[in-house]
Image (cartoon, helix red, strand yellow):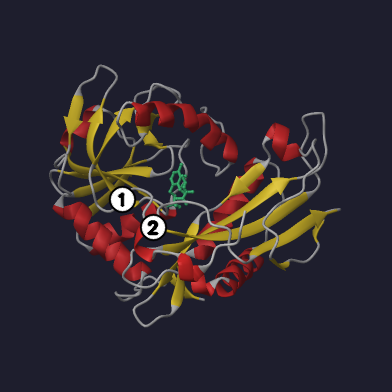
Amino acid sequence: MAKAKASELDWNKLGFGYRDLPYSWQEEYYDGEWLGGGLTSESNLVLNEAAQVLHYGQEVFEGLKAYRTKDGKVQLFRPEENAKRLNDSADRLMMPHYPVDKFLAAVKAVVKANEDFVPPYGTGGTLYLRPYMIGTQPLVGVTPSEHFVFRVYATPVGAYVKGLTPMPYVLSKYDRAAPAGTGRAKTSGNYAASLLPEMEAKKAGYADALYLDPKEHKYVDEFSGANFFGVTKDGQFVTPKSDSILPSITKRSLLQVAEDLGLNPVEKRLTLADLDDLAEAGAMGTAAVISPVGSLTDWDGKKHVFYSETEVGPVTTKLYNALFAVQVGDAEDKHGWVVPV
Ligand code: PLP
Ligand code: COI
């Protein structure tokens, strides 16, 4: 694959796809220690055919973005939280920690080395960063690897779900994670499990499937790549509490933003019946930012419309504007979330 050229990109029409940028970061782990990392222009990996990750899925990853501000600077949003979550995921997958300070240095180095690819302010584009770690040891038995590679790649992206346009969603009849499984970890297996439900949902005309808790199928969990939120008719910002969903950094940020905006933020187990109390609903995450949920269709084909199927609700708009303004440096960073590169 040929390396991307910044001069050939249309910043307003980036989409959410991979482009091969000049630099990634790589560090290997061997005999119990990280061997020293650095930038590399090699974006292909050579793995042994028996590498752990290829057969038994020992992988963890993160997703975060670098934002261009109005005055041309570049900043990250809460990258330390991604570093910590990578290590929480690594614990579940029996992988070593990548030290938080090294994670931050690696991410900053990749952004700086690819700075031409941070989209201009005002285009809605950002530089998406994908740190990840894989088990590379050749193994036939199902055991954890003792050799690992940590890498970070970057790619410029537009919105994952286009703009603040409400989309139709459908309740999934599949589970993405097992009870007491790996739902809280950001690991490839969860996404492999979500491919069929997501593709079936898309084929039927929906943006994605919404999963229920895998134990009782009574409570709302999350989407394939984003957490769920709702705004109640009496002005509460509610989002599911569950052990089988990814602890979203966007969610934690929006709980705070909601409080700052005078909404009442609540994390609780959310039943399907609770959806009737919602005036607005949305998906939230790094890639998704905030994507309004126009409607949710259940297993019986019954469609529940939230604010509107075509227009975004006023509270969702307020939350989006408040969060995005901090991320691109237009609003005061009251909570110390922004890290300059
Ligand atoms: N849930 C899943 C399954 C995800 O893949 C993501 C994306 O990272 C999220 C939620 C949102 O998490 P965050 O806000 O930290 O990006
Ligand atoms: C992210 O939001 O960073 C994710 O990893 C979600 C993925 C489905 C693109």
| Residue at 45% across, 75% down | 74
Label ID, residue 92: none
Rendering quarter of residue 189: top right
Which kind of residue does numbered mark 1 sit on?
Answer: Lys
Position of residue 226 measured from the top left corner of the image (x, y, whole percent): 40, 44
- Residue closer to the observer: 75 or 18: 18
For the residues labelled 2 and 1, say whether their Cβ atoms are less than 8 Å apart.
yes
Number of on-image labels:
2
Q: Is residue 100 visible?
A: yes
| Residue positioned most to the bottom | 71
Q: Is residue 45 above or below residue 24?
A: above
Residue named by callout 1:
162
| Residue at 61% across, 72% down | 109
Position of residue 241 measured from the top left corner of the image (x, y, whole percent): 38, 40
- Tell me the crowding category of disc 1: few under 14, some 14 to 19, or many 20 or more residues within 10 angstroms, Cα based: few
Instruction: Say which element carries label 1.
Output: loop
| Label 1 CB sits under 8 Å from any ligand 2 atom | no
| Residue at 15% across, 43% down | 310
Rendering quarter of residue 38: bottom right
Q: Is residue 29 above or below residue 54?
A: below
Position of residue 309 measured from the top left corner of the image (x, y, whole percent): 16, 39
| Label 2 CB sits under 8 Å from any ligand 2 atom | no
Which kind of residue does numbered mark 2 sit on?
Answer: Gly
- Label 2 vs label 1: CA separation? 8 Å
- Tell me the crowding category of disc 2: few under 14, some 14 to 19, or many 20 or more residues within 10 angstroms, Cα based: many
Instruction: Say which element carries label 2.
Output: loop
Left or right position of 249 against 239 = right
Position of residue 128 measured from the top left corner of the image (x, y, whole percent): 49, 59
Q: Is residue 263 visible?
A: no
Label ID, residue 158: 2
Left or right position of 284 against 113 = left
